Image (cartoon, grey):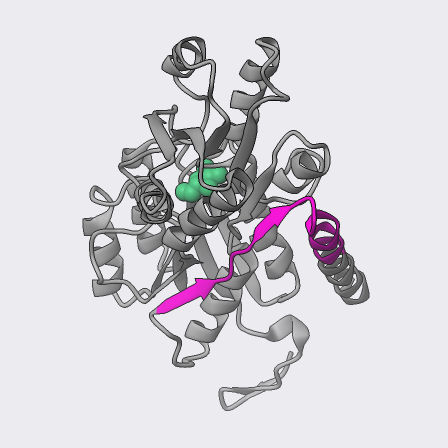
Amino acid sequence: FICILNSCNSSEADRKKISIGFSQSVGDDIWRTSMNHAMEVESSLHPEVNLRIYNANRQPKKQIRDIEKFIEDKVDVIIVSPFESDSIVPVIEKAKAKGIPVIIVDRKVNTSNYTAYLGADNIEVGRLAGKHLVSISKGYANVIQIYGDLNTSPGLERSLGFKQIIKQYPGIKVFDIDSDDFGHPKTNYIKLLDSLSNIDYVYAFNDLIAYNAWKIAKDKGLDKKIKFIGVDGLNGPFGGIQYVKDKILEATVLYPTGGSEAIRLALKIVNQEIVPKNNKLNTILIDSLNADIMSNQFDKIAIQQADIEQQQN
Ligand code: AHR
């Protein structure tokens, strides 16, 4: 391409590359892989973007090293989906001090020293699950609440929102149990099922836990008796929307990954647009009444993106 006295004719190919480093915290989880995929798809729609994804595989120290590497490489923007809220604070502050904008996605961090946060409101997620449970149970039920991880903001807030609603209905009793970091319900779930044969509902902090709990209930012949509510509402064969359609889950609450929005936000920041510090993604309850509509909508968006990609190639 031609540059005369430092002024360049910018064509598609010459456009300055924008490097975005994304530090993902968990690799073996479908919600996380869809977040990565959404980022890759959105990046492919912007040829100037060079996206690099590092996966910390649930290791806080690895996540810190990954972010350090992005700082060393002087990327234009760092996007972080944190594993822990505390240990990561110094490296985020370091990036900011070096003038690299930082976008936090999903889990919150215990500093306000970042450029923008992006995610759905997990208190609202918990409230939606609670309101649905109240309406289908008419205010009388025994419920097991299976946590994701109470050391994370989604874990804490999904519980907080749920309890805010449920505490208004004394006929609803909630028994709390733990899970392996948004994965399998811990063994005391099975013990609880044995001791409480009158469990009516399970509210699990994501669709994967809800599905794992449903499998345990199925083995015990309790899957028709107990209704399961999850969170995430991914589209596709192993997503919560399909589980609702298959009647495995009574309902799920949409928790968008924010993958494509994070890339768009990064581009705005690089282009020096002023962006809000807090960027809220919408959530909605998905049950048998709207599961088809929701998956059709997601399919349409995917087809539109594929079309744009094709046109660009
Ligand atoms: O931190 C949020 C949770 O992490 C998502 O709901 C879950 O599915 C993922 O593992």
Q: At which x and y percent is residue 227?
A: 56, 30
Image point (30%, 42%), residue name? 156
Q: In this rendering, would 168 be left or right of 193?
A: left
Image point (39%, 17%), residue name? 186
Q: At which x and y percent is residue 167?
A: 31, 43
Q: 46 above or below 9?
A: above
Image quarter in which the N terminus is found: bottom right
Looking at this view, is 13 or 241 the one in front?
Answer: 241
Q: Give the quadrant of residue 275.
A: bottom left
Residue stretch rendered in magenta on the structure: 278-299
Image point (48%, 29%), residue name? 202
Q: Is residue 61 magenta?
A: no
Q: Quadrant of ligand 1?
A: top left
Q: At which x and y percent is residue 23?
A: 41, 47
Q: At which x and y percent is residue 195?
A: 39, 10
Q: 67 above or below 246?
A: below
Q: Give the quadrant of residue 188.
A: top left
Q: In this rendering, would 131 be left or right of 86?
A: right
Q: How many marks?
A: 0
Q: Is residue 184 visible?
A: yes
Q: Is residue 297 magenta?
A: yes
